[in-house]
């Protein structure tokens, strides 16, 4: 098999985001792959903007990246018990301008949050939000990094062996979906 293309999507724009760290950890454990981190700095979805100007270039780039990826890994923060608005906005833009590029796509979902549940509620909501796109979402093992501000070392790597092991299993399962 040729080197697979992996797209990472972090639901946080913050430079120090633990979700971006987690997506990068997932990519490290997935290796070898051609990895790209998506830019979710999109305008807020606005039907008037779409009518006047069409799909913004940055949203089209995201759609193309999803289409061209062999697999996608998404990590969501938990904001007030739900997924981030940044991520939901990006998913909404991705659904415009033609059939969803997520259709049939192998997808792994992750979450990292400061709370004790590691973003479990956000992750549940994200799975629900993805339903209309009909991707192939792995159901487990669930990767939910709790107390995430202390879960990574100075190199951005997960500290807990258990988290590394679970994420590694999920990435192997993601690879296997591509090969099917
Ligand atoms: C508006 C807001 C709401 C939050 N709500 C939750 C929450 O419901 N559960 C939780 O575990 N953490 C919550 N947090 C803390 C986040 O888990 C923490 O800021 C985390 O680092 C965000 O992810 P990021 O580092 O990828 O940006 C909240 C943070 C913000 C800014």
Image (cartoon, rainbow, N blue to C red):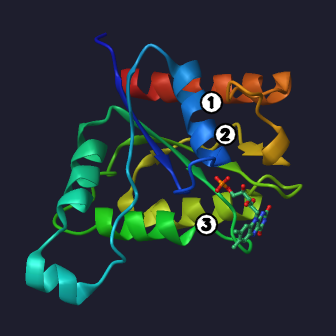
In the orientation shown, which residue stands out farthest toward the right? 116
Q: Give coordinates of residue 147: x percent, y percent.
A: 85, 48
In the displayed orientation, state which residue is furthest to the bottom: 48
Q: Check the image and report above or below for 123 versus 64.
A: below
Residue 84 lies, in percent from the top left, at: 58, 67
Side of 25 relative to 65 (left or right): right
Q: Nearer the viewer, residue 170 or 54?
A: 54
Q: Circle 2: is it few (<14), some (14-19), or many (20+) Cα within 10 Å?
A: some
Q: Is residue 132 positioned above or below 76 on the image?
A: below
Tell whether circle 3 marks a residue whose Cβ is less than 8 angstroms from ligand 1.
no
Question: Can residue 39 be seen?
Answer: yes
Which is more N-terminal, label 2 or label 1?
2
Q: Which mark is residue 170?
A: 1
Q: Distance between the residues labelled 2 and 3?
A: 18 Å
Which numbered mark, 3 or 1, is in the foreground of this view? 3
Q: Name the residue under label 2.
A: 140
Screen quadrant of the N terminus: top left
Disc number at residue 28? none
Label 3: which residue? 83
Nearer the observer, 160 or 180: 160
């Amino acid at each position: 098999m040729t080197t697979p293309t992996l797209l990472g999507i972090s639901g946080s724009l913050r430079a120090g985001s633990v979700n971006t760290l987690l997506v990068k950890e997932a990519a490290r454990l997935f290796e070898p792959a051609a990895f790209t981190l998506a830019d979710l700095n999109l305008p807020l979805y606005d039907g008037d903007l779409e009518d006047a100007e069409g799909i913004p270039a940055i949203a089209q780039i995201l759609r193309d990246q999803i289409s061209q990826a062999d697999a996608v890994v998404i990590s969501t923060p938990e904001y007030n018990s739900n997924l981030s608005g940044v991520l939901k906005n990006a998913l909404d833009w991705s659904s415009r301008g033609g059939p969803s590029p997520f259709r049939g796509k192998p997808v792994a979902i992750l979450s990292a949050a400061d709370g004790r549940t590691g973003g479990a509620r956000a992750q549940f909501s994200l799975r629900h939000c993805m339903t209309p796109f009909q991707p192939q979402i792995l159901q487990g093992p669930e990767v939910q990094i709790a107390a995430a501000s202390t879960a990574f070392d100075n190199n951005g790597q997960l500290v807990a062996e258990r988290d590394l092991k679970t994420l590694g299993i999920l990435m192997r399962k993601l690879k296997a979906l591509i090969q099917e």
